[in-house]
Amino acid sequence: MARRHHYHVYVIELSKEVLYERKFKKANPDYVPGKPCVYVGMTGLDPDQRFDKHKAGIQSNRYVLQYGLRLLPELYAVFNPMPYDGARDMEVELAIGLRDAGYGVWQA
């Protein structure tokens, strides 16, 4: 049987040190001080495995490699798993929603 719905969105909390990165700051002009900084992604892996790969430098986002602290499943678990197209769209929607809520967001 094919694994049809095995894609996930995930959110990783980033250290506040990421706010010193010019590109990150520029991407978040409406960041509300005190709100979390996060990376939003999608994967065909379990989010825990994907986080471990980021931290190991395997297909890693630079901000996650340097500043990634932990997964924030309370922000994404309700959506998973889903088909590829759903995860691709949800990654963007989730990033926009968090940014609108004042979070500092990086989504590649």
Image (spheres, rainbow, N blue to C red):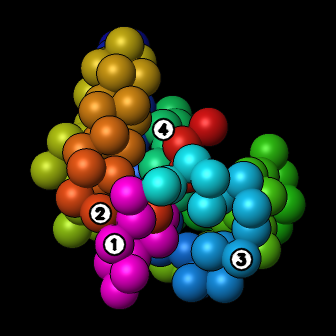
N-terminal of the two: label 3 or label 1?
A: 3
Q: Position of residue 20 (x, y in %)?
A: 71, 76
**Image marks 3 and 4: residues in contact by CB distance under 8 Å:** no
Compared with residue 14, is residue 102 higher up or lower down, i.e. above or below? above
Q: Which contiguous range is marked in magenta? A: 30-38
Q: Name the residue under label 4.
A: 42
**Residue at numbered disc 1:** 32
> Which residue in the structure is indicated by mark 3?
20
Indicate left or right for 68 with 28 as reference: right
Q: How far separated are the C-alphas under marks 2 and 4?
A: 21 Å
Mark nearer the N terminus (1 vs 4):
1
Determine the secondary structure under disc 3: helix
**Badge 1 amino acid:** Val
Residue 60 shows in this picture: yes
Q: Name the element at disc 1.
A: loop
Residue 3 vs residue 105: left or right?
A: left
Find the distance from the CA under tag 2 to the CA under tag 3: 17 Å
Distance of label 2 from label 1 (alpha carbons)? 5 Å
Q: Judge the density around disc 1: few (<14), some (14-19), many (≥20) Cα neighbours within 10 Å.
A: some
Find residue 21 and report its horizontal and vertical position in percent.
Answer: 74, 68
For the N terminus, which image quadrant? top left
Label 2 residue SS? loop
